[in-house]
């Protein structure tokens, strides 16, 4: 197997890279949580909280669509986030029958603390690396950005294929 430039690559290197990406995110998350004394949230709850905070409020249906989760899963997430004082339910201004999930001050604080501290943690770690290594990593940001775009295209294509199968 080779890359587009004809250079050999191995599945083992790709597996190692994929696992490294996962481990980097875990390490950043752990460092931020420890530094800021933030709660540990399961991935679905963290994703839901981020969506609710960044949107300023969503309906349960919009949340399910944004996260690609089933209604029962969303119902459980909503219940847990409400119990933990991350969200409140408000009647919709549009029809008054549906509910809008609104972030609490606690949710906004946790979200903002995570965002700002994530940058601080990565910056500190980069400063501790040899200059040559931190420069190489920063020089690879465009390639990683392209990789992210390709991963999103793959996900979009798979989503579209799944929707086609349902029709």
Image (cartoon, rainbow, N blue to C red):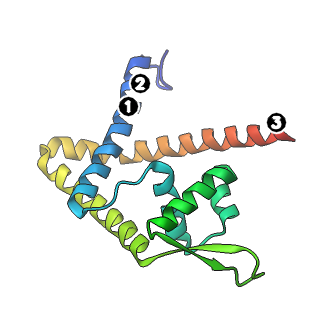
Q: Do the residues labelled 3 and 2 touch (CB within 8 Å)?
A: no
CA gap between label 3 and label 2 equals: 30 Å
Local packing at callout 1 (Cα closer than 10 Å; few below 14, some 14-19, many 20+) is few
Residue 102's x, y, as percent?
Answer: 55, 75
Most foreground residue, 68 or 151: 68
Residue at 23% across, 56% down:
34
Residue drawn at x 55%, y 57% is 77
- Residue 148, x across and y down, in percent: 49, 44
Tell me if I can see residue 9 in this picture.
Answer: no
The residue identified by callout 2 is: 15
Picture coordinates of residue 65 (x, y %)? 68, 56
Q: Earlier in the sequence, mark 1 or mark 3?
A: 1
Q: For the point 32% across and 51% down, which residue is it?
A: 29
Please tell me whether residue 103 is drawn above or below residue 49 in the rendered image.
below
Q: Is residue 44 visible in the rendered structure shown here?
A: yes
Q: Name the residue under label 1.
A: 19
Neighbourhood count class around disc 2 (C-alpha, 10 Å): few under 14, some 14–19, many 20 upward:
few
Q: Is mark 3 on a helix, strand or loop?
A: helix
The label on residue 165 is 3
Q: Going by the picture, which residue comes out furthest to the bottom?
A: 93
Instruction: Give above or below for 163 relative to 18.
Output: below
SS type, badge 2:
helix
Task: Residue 144 in the image: state x and y as whole percent.
Answer: 41, 43
Contact between marks 1 and 3 (CB within 8 A): the answer is no
**Residue contact between numbered discs 2 and 1, judged by CB atoms under 8 Å:** yes
- C-alpha span from label 2 to label 1: 6 Å
User: In the shown orientation, is residue 131 left or right of residue 3?
Assistant: left
Using the image as rendered, state which of residue 43 and residue 13 is in the foreground: 43
Q: In which quarter of the image is residue 76?
A: bottom right
Quarter of image, res 61: bottom right
């Amino acid at each position: 197997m080779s890359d587009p430039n004809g250079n050999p690559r191995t599945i083992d290197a790709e597996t190692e890279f994929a696992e490294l990406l996962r481990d980097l995110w875990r390490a950043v998350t752990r460092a931020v949580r420890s530094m800021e004394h933030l709660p540990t949230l399961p991935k679905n709850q963290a994703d839901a909280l981020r969506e609710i905070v960044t949107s300023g409020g969503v309906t349960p249906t919009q949340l399910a669509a944004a996260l690609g989760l089933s209604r029962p899963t969303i119902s459980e997430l909503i219940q847990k986030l409400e119990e933990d004082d991350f969200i409140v339910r408000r009647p919709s201004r549009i029809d008054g029958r549906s509910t809008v999930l609104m972030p609490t001050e606690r949710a906004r604080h946790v979200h903002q603390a995570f965002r700002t501290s994530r940058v601080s943690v990565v910056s500190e770690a980069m400063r501790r690396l040899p200059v040559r290594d931190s420069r190489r990593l920063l020089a690879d940001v465009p390639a990683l950005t392209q990789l992210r775009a390709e991963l999103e295209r793959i996900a979009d294509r798979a989503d579209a294929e799944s929707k086609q199968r349902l029709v």
